[in-house]
């Protein structure tokens, strides 16, 4: 029941609660992040997760076709008549023996969760179907987001579907053309700011507050509710069993935050008997989380996060005029808005954080392409990170691991083409130049 849902501040010193009929996105009392929460005694949650599998037989119903709303009792914050869907969540979990063997793992241990099959080509659609459902419930007419690319594509697509005016903020030269083309194609107003994603994020919040626009970044707690379902589908594909490890790229930290919340709730409801471990992989050029957790020792601490560590860290970034740089544009973020929720996920999932270089990301991306599925650069951070975790013995070679591939290969084709044609790594597969002569061509093919 939608009226069993409410919003709560994550700061335990505040804990203020608000109705889901409000579009506020930050706690009005203390300014901290908000969670969507549920009175589970009033929600008709099945006794077993496998009960959700019965909806495969009723996919002629629009909500049962959705890979998000198929699990709607676990994120039931609005009535069904407001729930938006364009067929998101038709994704696959691919067991990849070839990459597992290359990494020295047991052949059946590695699985790739491919979110590139979503309508806009990335995992963002899981969150947007939920956030736009909330937008429709509260009567929004205009929306906005800041984006490194995938968010703008997904927001523009869902805004078009819902009939909302849409504005996206991007940084100067900081977006892959494959993603920008989608936002323009779907009719969004695109505003390019002289700055990076963090600048865009600051401005879009101010604009939404000033003009009353509906904010679609992962600061929006309802977006994260939709992203929880990526984990439900992984469990579903594994015969309703949780894996040993989830590996995910770390950017604005919405996915990792959503995954931690998903497992916390499933464990509380008795729908899983154990919580998998979580590995979050940054790029070295945008490694705020890695530095804060591993070096500054920032922890969840029951929600009593040491804000001074964060403030001092961000002040130093500002003093140094630091701007993140990585080929993995989707995770090129230095001030992640979901930092505190991610710390909670690390706590819930006994998580680890690490960073990998752009060279490692490009090699891993080519490896995935050679033996599995084309993906955007940020997705490949998972395999690059997994290689380190295996070498350290953090992940055992027979652990069942699910790596989340966040977006489609055509999101950023320039990185792929340059890697191969310029022979930038061990898996480069450059075109071979040959004279326009049949005999010479045949020599190459034989």
Image (cartoon, rainbow, N blue to C red):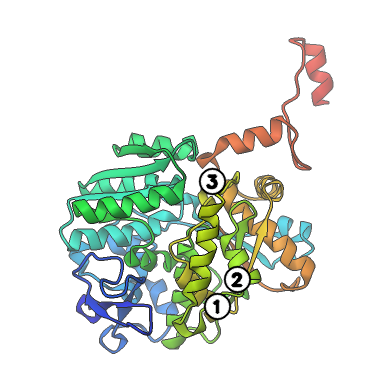
- The image's mark for residue 38 is none
Image quadrant where residue 81 sits:
bottom left
The residue nearer to you, when weighing 346 against 390, is 346
Measuring from the top left, give residue 408's x and y in whole percent: 52, 46
Q: CA distance from mark 1 to mark 3?
A: 27 Å
Measuring from the top left, give residue 55's x and y in whole percent: 36, 69
Measuring from the top left, give residue 13's x and y in whole percent: 36, 84
- The image's mark for residue 329 is 3
Q: CA distance from mark 2 to mark 1?
A: 7 Å
Image quadrant where residue 24 sits:
bottom left
In the image, what residue occupies the spot 76% across and 70% down? 397
Using the rendered image of the protein, determine whether residue 42 is visible from the camera's viewpoint. Answer: yes
* Label 2 neighbour load within 10 Å: few <14, some 14-19, many 20+: some
Mark 1 lies on a secondary structure that is loop
Mark 2 lies on a secondary structure that is helix
In the image, what residue occupies the spot 27% across and 75% down? 29
The residue nearer to you, when weighing 435 against 162, is 162
Residue bearing mark 1: 299
Camera-side mark, 1 or 3: 1
Mark 3 lies on a secondary structure that is helix
Quadrant of the snapshot with the C terminus: top right
In the image, what residue occupies the spot 32% across and 79% down? 37
User: Relative to 172, is 298 on the left or the right?
Assistant: right
The residue nearer to you, when weighing 224 against 333, is 333
Residue bearing mark 2: 293
Measuring from the top left, give residue 197's x and y in whole percent: 45, 48
**In the image, is residue 300 above or below residue 131?**
below
Please say if the residues under marks 2 and 1 sit with CB atoms less than 8 Å apart.
yes
């Amino acid at each position: 029941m939608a009226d069993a849902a409410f919003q709560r501040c994550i700061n335990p010193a505040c804990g203020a609660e608000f109705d889901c009929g409000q579009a506020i996105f930050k706690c009005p009392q203390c300014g901290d992040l908000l969670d969507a929460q549920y009175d589970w005694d009033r929600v008709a949650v099945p006794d077993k997760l496998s009960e959700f599998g019965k909806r495969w037989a009723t996919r002629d119903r629009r909500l049962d076709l959705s890979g998000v709303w198929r699990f709607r009792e676990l994120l039931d914050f609005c009535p069904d008549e407001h729930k938006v869907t364009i067929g998101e969540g038709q994704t696959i979990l691919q067991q990849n023996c070839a990459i597992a063997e290359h990494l020295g793992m047991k052949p059946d241990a590695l699985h790739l969760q491919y979110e590139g099959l979503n309508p806009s080509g990335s995992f963002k659609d899981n969150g947007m179907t939920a956030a736009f459902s909330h937008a429709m419930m509260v009567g929004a007419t205009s929306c906005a987001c800041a984006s490194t690319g995938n968010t703008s594509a997904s927001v523009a697509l869902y805004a078009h579907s819902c009939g909302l005016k849409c504005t996206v903020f991007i940084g100067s030269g900081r977006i892959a053309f494959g993603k920008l083309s989608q936002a323009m194609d779907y009719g969004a107003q695109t505003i390019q700011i002289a700055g990076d994603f963090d600048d865009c994020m600051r401005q879009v919040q101010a604009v939404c507050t000033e003009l009353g626009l509906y904010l679609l970044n992962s600061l929006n707690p309802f977006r994260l509710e939709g992203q929880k379902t990526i984990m439900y589908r992984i469990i579903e594909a594994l015969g309703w069993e949780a894996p040993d490890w989830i590996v995910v790229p770390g950017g604005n930290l919405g996915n990792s935050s959503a995954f931690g919340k998903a497992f916390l709730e499933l464990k509380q409801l008795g729908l899983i008997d154990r919580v998998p471990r979580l590995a979050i992989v940054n790029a070295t050029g945008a490694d705020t989380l890695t530095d804060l957790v591993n070096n500054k020792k920032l922890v969840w601490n029951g929600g009593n996060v040491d804000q001074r560590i964060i403030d001092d860290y961000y002040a130093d970034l500002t003093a140094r005029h630091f701007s993140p740089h990585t080929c993995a544009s989707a995770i090129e973020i230095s001030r992640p808005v979901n930092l505190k929720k991610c710390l909670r996920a690390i706590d819930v999932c006994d998580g680890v954080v690490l960073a990998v270089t752009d060279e490692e990301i490009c090699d891993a991306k080519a490896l995935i392409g050679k033996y599995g599925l084309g993906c955007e650069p940020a997705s490949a951070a998972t395999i690059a990170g997994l290689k380190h975790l295996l070498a350290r013995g953090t992940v055992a070679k027979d652990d069942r691991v699910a790596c989340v591939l966040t977006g489609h290969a055509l999101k950023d084709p320039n990185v792929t083409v340059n890697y191969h044609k310029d022979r930038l790594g061990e898996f480069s597969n450059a075109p071979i130049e040959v004279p326009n002569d049949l005999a010479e061509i045949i020599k190459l093919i034989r």
